[in-house]
Image (cartoon, coloured by chain):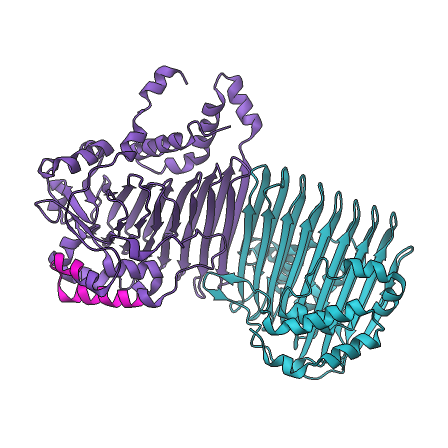
Amino acid sequence: MSTQLTANLTEEQVQQISAELDEPDWLLETRLDALAALEDLDMPKVIRTPGRDWTNLDALDYETLVDPLEWEQEKDRVDAEGVDVLSWSDALDQHGDLIEDHFGSVVDPQRDYLTALSTALFAAGTVVYVPEGVAAEDVKIRTTMNSRSLFNYTLVIAEESSSVTILERQSTGTNIEGEQYYSGVVEAVAGENAHIQYGTLQNLAEDSYNFQVKRGHADTYASIDWIEGNIGSRLTKTNVETRLLGDSSESKIVGAFFGHEDQHFDLASRVWHEAEHTTADLITRGVLDDAARSVYEGVQDVGREAWDTNSYQRENTLMLSEDSEADASPKLIINNHDTEASHSATVGQVDEEDLFYMTSRGVHPELARNMLVEGFFVPVLEEVAVDELREDLDDLIVERLVE
Amino acid sequence: MSSDQDHLKEADTEARFEFKKEEKSAFETEKGLTEETVRLISEDKDEPEWMLERRLRALEQFQQMPMPTDWPGQPDLSEVDLNEIVPYIRPDIETRGGAENWEDLPEEIQDTFDKLGIPEAEKNALSGVGAQYESEIVYQNMQERWEEKGVIFMDMDKAVREHPDLVKEHFMTKCVPPSDNKFAALHGAIWSGGSFVYVPEDTTVDMPVQAYFRMNSEGMGQFEHTLIIAEENSEVHYIEGCSAPKYSAFNLHSGCVEVFVRDNAHVQYSTVQNWSKNTYNLNTKRAIVEEDATMEWVSGSMGSKATMLYPATILKGPGATDNHITIAMAGEGQNIDTGAKVYHNAPDTKSTIESKSIAKDGGRTNYRGLVHISDGAENSSTSVECDALMFDNESTSDTMPYMEIQENKVDVAHEATVGKIGDEDVFYLQSRGLDDDDAKQMIVAGFIEPITEELPIEYAVELNRLIELEMEGSLG
């Protein structure tokens, strides 16, 4: 399957992007290969329930959305001591070999149509390099999208026994009209005993289409934690994934989403247990109002050789309106019996008794509901290590509640 | 367990299912599936024109539909070549439509069911019994007191002739149309045998009725159809049992069950499936449940090479209830892909799904389930619980639940756990003098107890025996 898009895209454009970033040949080649592959690649898999796809990526008109050379953003990078937080051109300059080693090693540049498109066209983005033994907190990357389309690529390399917490914020500037397309790819490599917490707060304008792939490889004793806050966009399709490749490695995928009006979230998370004594914990909570729709899938995949696995998953959705819809599908794929695994999912509404209790104490019903919804997110917020992310997420939730 | 007790443990359980009988048939179609075959079956059954038309329409749908191949983890169906199946074998019996006395049956068929213990069970615990051998019901009988109350329990083929109005209205129309899936369409074209159960208003059939299905010939397909109509305020429990001897070629079982549960009625449908391990078991089972009525599915799947079975319930009337209880056990070479489907289409409906699966020796169990709550199905609640037990890292256990929620005033909960047999539990039992095998058997029996509890005692015992048989000597 391919779309009309390639008609609009040329090798020259890709060469131009690459030249502007002063890239080495191998990266240009990777881009051109990805461009050439577009023709044969399928759209990313969306979540299916029996017989139905709930998200239609083919219906997007990429021709009007994508403008490869006209990209504009505002980037604010806050580094921490001992960590390099660099633009692509600086990073290629300083850590060329390292980047060549890791680029595309976690996220296959040709895993699907939209990822290949991102690889071919990305101009914005950040490389975070954490040298051995460095412990860094509060790396912040703030991206404001100021063009019709933006392709953002982030590579995180954490060397042995290092640790880093990263907060990425995505928002839209005030001057763009019409629909937009944001595409983000994040690759995270956690070396032995390295710890990465990568938090994203997505608050893009509500006429934007948002596609994100985040994937990490965890080595022995390493941990990769993903925090996903989804508030903005018209349509969001995310894949957040960790491969636990080293013994005793761990991963958490923590998600919070709040949809209203006609927002659509298609959120997939997946952990592969591929070594011994690994642990995964997937926790997502979401609220839906108006005619918003969510489709959630979480997969815990325990391999044949994954002895002594612990794997847990919880998903809870709260529905605030008649017209909202929620689908949930937590999946277990277990190939080794030496596993303790569980998953659970619930869908419900604000508890009538709780509401009654609060109104009987004189709290206005509207306020009572808002307090209960805010409280619903607490178990997720508690997992967030970066204060700014937790506070901002909470603020955005409250803001949406009082709208 | 001492050897004395071993001796009492129905040592011939295996023999009860594995024996073969020489094939003897009165009429057998050619292999394969053509319009000609369908016409032959219909003609041999002396069917009315409308049924033939339905069969031909289903055949057309079957030919147009693709094989299901893109379900994650599904059994491999590439071996299922429908041109290699003998779809219809009429056993050589005098009385079509089912004899009323076991003595009237040819000796080898009588002997088959004797070995399976059916006549014995009939005496003790059942209101009625039907027995199907190859493609047709060979025995059907019900206690007189139920007949007097207007309860009907008869061979499906006979029902087409004797109750055309009821059958015409309910047979593969609103409940399972042939277009539902490829194997439902196949079934619609070449179905044969099965039971028709009709329970009039305000009637409680207090002992279960049972049908037993036996495939005896190599390379045959069995396509029995079960239609149950429970009128207002009635109650019935239907049990089906299945078995076949093992051959080298594959067998195909593609049954269809349709259940209509009218207002305030109660139907329980229990299955103990023990097809031989060369059988593909691809069934469609569905119930439509009206106001304040209850449907219960209880299934134990031990046999077959591959099973794809997801009993479905449509909760159509307000206050309707569904309960699903399933056990699946997969050993070497088996892929048991089973689960449940529930549609909440009315307010105040309630469903519970309880699934237990055991995978060992490289077997694979999948739980695949769907709960759909439609817009307007206010105050509905559903709870899904799946537990899987695994013995080794050769085996696979997948849990794939789907929930589609279009209504906000609902209570939806899903939970699943996967675990291994606890070494501590085994150690505890061993320290009490049990050997390793017995300890594990006991833990498995405890694991599935919530399900065996729901079965009449004879079946609970049978299920336990089957599981013991599956477990014997296979544990490391």
Instruction: Look at chain B in the picture and name its colour.
Output: purple
Task: Find the residue positioned furthest to the right.
Answer: A81
Specify start and end residues of the magenta stretch as a single range: B40-61
The relative height of residue B9 versus residue B183 in the rendered view (above or below) is: above
The total number of labels drawn is 0
Q: Quadrant of the N terminus of chain B?
A: top left
Q: Is residue B70 above or below residue B308?
A: below
Give whichever of A48, B231 is nearer the camera.
A48
Per the image, is B46 magenta?
Answer: yes
Is residue A52 positioned above or below A345 on the image? below
Q: Judge from the rendering whether residue A276 lies leftward or rightward of residue A351; answer left or right.
A: right
Tell me the residue at 41%/51% (across/down).
B340
- Residue at 13 percent across and 47 percent down: it is B149
A4 and B97: which is toward the camera: A4
Residue B442 point in image, percent of width and height: 45, 27
Rendered position, B290 above or below A25:
above
Residue A130 image point, x, y percent: 85, 54
The color chain A is rendered in? cyan
Left-right relation of B149 to B470: left
- Which of B57/B454 is in front? B57
Is residue A158 magenta-colored? Answer: no
Main SS of the magenta part reads helix
